[in-house]
Each structure stands twice: as structure tokens, then as C-alpha cells.
Image: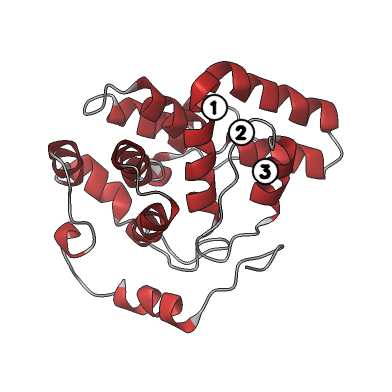
Amino acid sequence: MNTSQRIWNPTEMLLNIISKESKTVSHYIRPESLQERLIIQDKQWQEGAFWGEPRPGHPEGKIIYHICEVLQNVDKITNNPKIRQQLRLIAITHDSFKHLEEQTRPRTDWSKHHAIFALNFSKKHITDKAILDVIELHDEAYYAWRAANKGKYEKANFMLNRLRERLGNNMQLFYLFFKCDTQTGDKYQSPILWFEKMMEKEIDIVDF
């Protein structure tokens, strides 16, 4: 694994070609629970899952291809049934509402962040607070890294402390998802490496 940017290999690039074909959601995700089945059958979810064009960090294009890649990482990162189930639900929902996100920068309304749309949708199907918290906060470690990368260390530490307060004993679940999410597409690996260093006393670092 490149420490700065993930290498996008030819097999993965093929996914972008396949994504141009017309297929139903069942070709991509095989639900393993009633919760998953209800989510992927939801037309609102499907609209977002099949949205997207190739872009930096996401050469695969459509959101559903990113979800599939994250799910593959989930299979690699744990064999614990409960954690695996939690990570799968987070993966399936976390980015599925990017098509609704406010595009102006700097952001003027954080309630229109895709994570908030995903959280509000997920509450219809999920009651596990740990899962809902990670869905809501799944980009926060990246934002903390970005602040530190710009020399805004006080802001970065504030954001990490806020994560600690919100997540409590669920920090490991958050970390596992952050790892699965970061090792996709051609994303830079600096954010996850920085997070592992900053939180090394609070998480069990894993590799796959």
C-alpha cells in the first residue's frame, strides 16, 4: 500500500467500465439481513447509489461501486459477526446521499452534508446508536487530518476530542470503518496513517 496515495489497479478500473451497463442493485449487493434488504430496495437509496461520475478519490464513478469496494474491505478486516454486520450497514448507507449535498464551498449549511442525509435516512431502518454515530461522523477524522495538514493543530485536536466524546467505546468501530473507506479508489492514505498515529493508544491498529 502506497503511504501517500492508493494505486488504482487495472481490475478496479474495469469496474468503471462495467458501471456503464444497466444492472439492478442485486447484481452489486447481496443483502445479508432484513435491514440491508429494506435499505437497498428503497428507491431513495437507489437514486443516490447509482449517482456519480469518476472524480478524484473515486475513479470508480458511481457510489454503488465505492460501496462494493468498502464491503470487500469489511470482509478482510474482521470475522466478528456483530462488527461485520455493523460495518456493512455503515458502508451501504454512508455515501449514498452525496447527490443531495450542498456543493458551495465553503459550506454554508452543514445540515446539507451527505452524512446528515445518510443519518436521517438510516434512522428509518437502524436503531443501533453506534452505527448511526459512525454514519454521521464518518468524515470527521478526514477533516481533522486536513486541518492538521494545513497547520491548524489546535482545530485538529479539538475535532479529535469531539470524536472521543461522541464515540466513547465505539472508537474502534469508527476506526475500522475509516480504514475500510480510505483503502478504496485512489484515495490518499495519509489521513488514515495520521489517525492511527494520533490514536494509537486508543485503538487496535489493523492491516489487511
Residue 163, placed above or below residue 40: above
Label ID, residue 107: 2
Label ID, residue 152: none
Of the two numbered discs 3 and 1 in the rendering, the one whose residue sits closer to the viewer: 3
Residue 189 in picture, x, y percent from top left:
65, 57
Label ID, residue 110: 1
Residues at badges 2 and 1 in contact (C-beta under 8 Å)? Answer: yes
* SS for callout 2: loop
Q: CA distance from mark 2 to mark 1?
A: 7 Å
| Residue drawn where x is 47% and y is 67% of the image | 54
> Which amino acid lies under the numbered mark 3 shown in the image of this protein?
Glu
**Number of numbered tags placed on the structure image:** 3
Looking at the image, which residue sits at the far top? 165
In the image: residue 173, left or right of residue 142: left
Residue 82, placed above or below residue 70: above
- The mark that comes first in sequence, 3 or 1, is 1
> Which amino acid lies under the numbered mark 2 shown in the image of this protein?
Arg
Q: CA distance from mark 3 to mark 1?
A: 26 Å
* SS for callout 1: helix
Label 2: how many residues lie within 10 Å, few (<14), some (14-19) or many (20+)? few
Q: Which residue is mark 3?
A: 196
Q: CA distance from mark 3 to mark 2?
A: 28 Å
Q: Is residue 138 visible?
A: no
* SS for callout 3: helix
